[in-house]
Amino acid sequence: MIDERLKASKDLETDVNFEVLLKLHICGAAAREFQKMHDHFIQVNDPRRCLDLYKDKYCSDFKDLFNERDQCQTKAEEFTCLCLRPALEESVAHSLGPDIVDEMLTGENALQFSTRAFFQYSILKHLLSEFNFENYDSYICSYEKFVKNWIFGQIKERFSKGQKMFQLEDKHLKAINICRELGDTLVIPKDALSAFMILNNAEQEQFAHCLKTSVEEMEKSLRIKFQEGVDAQRKLEQLRIKPQNVLFKRVFGCGKQCPFCKAPCEAGGEAHTDHCASIHRPQVSKNSICYETNQTYHPYKKYRDIFPNWHIPADPSIEASDYWKYVMAKFNKEFAKKYDALPAITPPAWKLITKEQAEKSLKESFSIN
């Protein structure tokens, strides 16, 4: 895997010594993580720790057995609190991420995640509406990070309003059929299960009634907890499956960027051979250097000799997008300061472009009516 990543980074000049040091560093970090996992496993499964954890319960059970007391109510409550509740909370937490993804793909504003091209349009439109240089700089220089933060912001905005987050959690709370419907997804802790398995002087019908009552009370308690729980952002940050990462993989595509302007590839499918972008940026917005030509000049019209996987059709109008003209005209000095360079010499007509014209140009570039 390390060798494959090194081969993919053609612009890095490496030698054998560098590769050995890199592999030692990565393997050393992995070894420390495996050691932590091993230590955690030993601690969790330590017999003495497990015995101490349920010592009081075992003592109480022994007294009930010795005195031949009915344990129906006690054991029903123990099973609900120690087994069902943790398992149900884990199941809800595990299901919430995919549920949020489905909601984002089918609910309000789902169109912005429908295709990669429309996703790019949505981001560029958002940037234009906010029109902040720091946002554009982050989008250009840290595209992946910016996109993930933007998606997270969309999810947060969607689920911070009303009771949408609670509704997704609440649909998993069905007291009567909870075990039958979630039998394949509930993972009941074995330690807690073994702690109440001894049931003395109990009739099945009586225990079933007590268990049903305890489960109904648990449902009410969890519903209150979910409804009055932490804010949406904190819940999103604590999810097992991060919806922003799932959505990101769906719309991010192959991750390749135009070698000249760093515009992201919008080609569909996972195994496409040619990369393309609907709208390209002015080269002045790109702060990286092209290493592929080995510092030798090469005609632009023969770009496929160097980048055979990119398809960049010639523009017969010889006109750049009004969208990026507008951005460059407004943030020319900011880009120059950011890249420690002189401001670009832009045509006077660029400064006359309005925000409305920039948005119209954006729609035309992505064929949005």
Image (tube, rainbow, N blue to C red):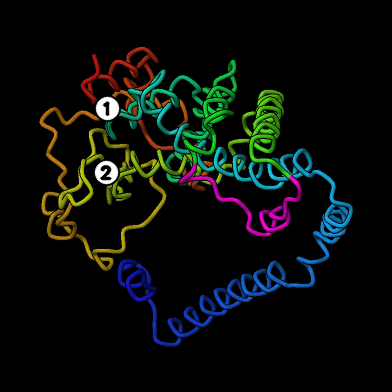
Closer-to-camera residue (308/260): 308
Secondary structure mostly taken by the magenta-highlighted segment of the chain: loop
Left or right relative to 22: residue 2 = left
Amino acid bearing label 2? Cys
Q: Is residue 64 magenta?
A: no
Residue 186 on the magenta segment: yes
In the image, residue 349 sits, relative to residue 283, either above or below, namely above
Q: Residues within 10 Å of mark 1 (few under 14, many from 20)?
A: some
Q: Is residue 5 visible in the rendered structure shown here?
A: yes
Relative to 63, 42 lies left or right:
left
Query: Label 2 belongs to which residue?
Result: 265
Q: Amino acid at mark 1?
A: Ser
Look at 52% across and 26% down and name the residue there.
171
Q: Which residue is label 1 attached to?
A: 321
Percent x, y of residue 69: 84, 46
Q: Which residues are magenta?
A: 183-201
In front: 186, or 3? Answer: 186
What kind of element bears circle 1? Answer: loop
Q: Earlier in the sequence, mark 2 or mark 1?
A: 2
